[in-house]
Image (cartoon, helix red, strand yellow):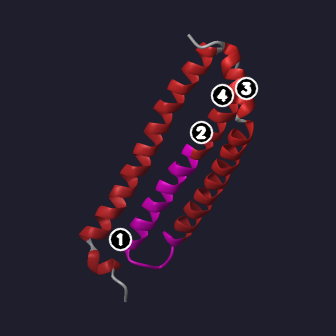
Amino acid sequence: MTKVEDFVEYKQTNKAKFDELISLSGQLEKNSQDAAAKFEVASKLDTSAKFKEYNGLKAQEFKKRAEAQKLMQTFVKGFVAETDVEKMDASIADYNTKSAALVEEANGIAAKGDKLVKDNSSEFKDK
């Protein structure tokens, strides 16, 4: 069985990597939120209904991706701060479940958008 001291040492040794992961995840979250906002604006433009629908789906997808990045930041911060091995294990399991669900949901929304484009290719061709 691994000792708590091993985890503490691991976290201290890799602090810079954890900090970088938190920072990069924060940047990804912001970029995803920005993309979602732009798609949201595009979904309200005077365009075809299918194009509006596609942009609305992309906005939803990027909101989910931003949510997944926020979850990662929260998880990593909590993981680094936690000293109880059992709580760390529970935290990892919880994160994995929630993260997988968010990614699956985002991928499902993306698939709907892809299908919309495929089924209505004439409306999405370069003009």
Q: Which is more N-terminal, label 3 or label 2?
A: 2
- Which residue is at a point 70% across and 35% down the rendered structure image? 14
Residue underneath mark 4: 79
Q: Are marks 4 and 3 in contact (CB under 8 Å)?
A: yes
Q: Residue furthest top?
A: 1
Residue underneath mark 2: 71
- Which residue type carries mark 1? Lys
Q: Are marks 2 and 1 in contact (CB under 8 Å)?
A: no
Within 10 Å of disc 3 (Cα), the crowding (few <14, some 14-19, many 20+) is few
Q: Element type at marker 2?
A: helix
The quadrant where residue 105 appears: top left
Q: Nearer the viewer, mark 3 or mark 1?
A: 3
The quadrant of the picture occupied by the N terminus is top right
- Secondary structure, magenta segment, majority class: helix
- Which residue is at a point 45% across and 45% down the rendered structure image? 103
- Which residue type carries mark 4? Phe
Residue underneath mark 3: 81
- Which residue is at a point 57% across and 45% down the rendered structure image? 67
- Which residue type carries mark 2? Leu
Q: Element type at marker 4?
A: helix
Q: Could you tell whether 37 is left or right of 54 in the image?
A: right
Q: Could you tell whether 66 is left or right of 126 in the image?
A: right
Q: Which is more N-terminal, label 1 or label 3?
A: 1
Q: Which mark is residue 23?
A: none
Within 10 Å of disc 1 (Cα), the crowding (few <14, some 14-19, many 20+) is some
Q: Is residue 52 magenta?
A: yes
Q: Is the residue 75 above or below the residue 35 in the image?
A: above
Residue underneath mark 1: 50
Magenta residues, start to end: 42-68
Within 10 Å of disc 4 (Cα), the crowding (few <14, some 14-19, many 20+) is some
Q: Nearer the viewer, mark 2 or mark 1?
A: 2
Q: Nearer the viewer, mark 1 or mark 4?
A: 4
